[in-house]
Amino acid sequence: MPSARLATAFIRATPLTFALLWSSGFIVAKYAAADADPFTFLAARFASAMLILAAIAFATRAPWPATAREAGHCMMAGVLLHGLYLAGVWWAIAQGLPAGIAGLFSAMQPLLTALLAAPLLGDRVTTWQWGGIVTGFIGILLVLAPRLVVVDVAALGTVAVPMLVNLVAIVAVTLGTFYQKRFLAGADLRTGTCLQFVGALVVVVPLTLIGPTRFDPTPSLILSLAFAVLVLSIAAIALLLVMIRRGEVARVAALIYLVPPLTAILAFALLGESLSAVQIAGMAVTAVGVWLATRRA
């Protein structure tokens, strides 16, 4: 049936579509940084996404969590997946953490996920998956090589706190993936995600009070915010939650390896950044690693 074929094609395209959308987030952050501080921008992003999803939920009569405990699980997932993760990464980069180091930390997420899959969820990571995860990590090192070689190792001590915050952010999003799989497998995507952004706001709103806030509503910032809300916080997150619900977290986490290569391609196309032969080779190695880690027997 045509509808069945369409659904199958959509499911097969979901991983690559998610990776492509998620990789654009770093480009958005670069455009937004000139006109807004990280916490204020994220607060505006989360609040806008929450209101849009609430309107969709009421319009479509989506079921809300039946108990306060279920609602609390949704908000806790938002604290981990959105609040702590994005606030930590964006703040660390704004404080001078080299992009190469930030990318290297992000590449640690699939490794951490694979290590925790068995003890936390009982998911078995196969030999093929481990081979793919390690291969993907090697590919990411090649993709990030131009940024890593310019890092002043002696000066890393000056960004020790941003490095620690970034690492905490990676741990938070990893635990958030497990939390989503464990407690929210049956939650409605509309209302559940709406409450996740409530949890994310609990993290970022107090952070806006710490330092000077900056939000200059230029056309560039408004477009960046609209893209971040509609494409990243709604479309990409919906795809991520669907993948977590349908598959093992180790397979889903391996898709994160596609983000740095796709980001490099987007930066080359949109920002005029260079793309070396080593990076292109790294993209090929990463693609092989992701294929091995996500293939099914």
Image (spheres, rainbow, N blue to C red):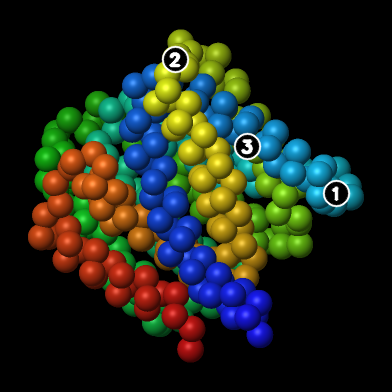
Q: Name the residue under label 2.
A: 216
Q: Mark 3 points at which residue?
A: 49
Residue type beneath disc 2: Asp
Q: In this view, does 291 lie above or below 50?
A: below
Report the front residue among 48 and 256.
48
- Which quadrant holds residue 200? top right
Residue drawn 61% across the image and 74% down it? 7
Residue type, mark 3 in image:
Ala
Q: Residue lying furthest top in this view?
A: 212
Asked if residue 165 shows in the view, the reply is no
Mark found first going from the N terminus, 2 or 3:
3
Q: What element carries label 1?
A: loop
Q: In this view, does 170 lie above or below 289?
A: above
Q: Is residue 66 visible?
A: yes
For the residues bearing labels 2 and 3, Cβ distance under 8 angstroms? no
Which of marks 1 and 3 precedes in the sequence? 3
Left or right of 224 in this view: 194: right
Nearer mark to the viewer, of 3 and 1 = 1
Question: Foreground residue, 218 or 155?
Answer: 218
Mark seen at residue 61: 1
Q: How far apart are marks 2 and 1 (CA)?
A: 36 Å
How many angstroms separate mark 2 from mark 3 (CA)? 20 Å
Binning the other alpha carbons within 10 Å of mark 2 as few (below 14), some (14 to 19) or many (20 upward) gives: some
Q: Is residue 131 above or below residue 74?
A: below
Q: Residue furthest bottom?
A: 297
Residue lying at 22% horizontally and 33% vertically, measured from the top left: 156
Q: Which amino acid does label 1 sit on?
A: Arg
Does residue 179 appear left or right of residue 263 in this picture? right
User: Which one is earlier in the sequence, the residue at label 2 or at label 1?
Assistant: 1
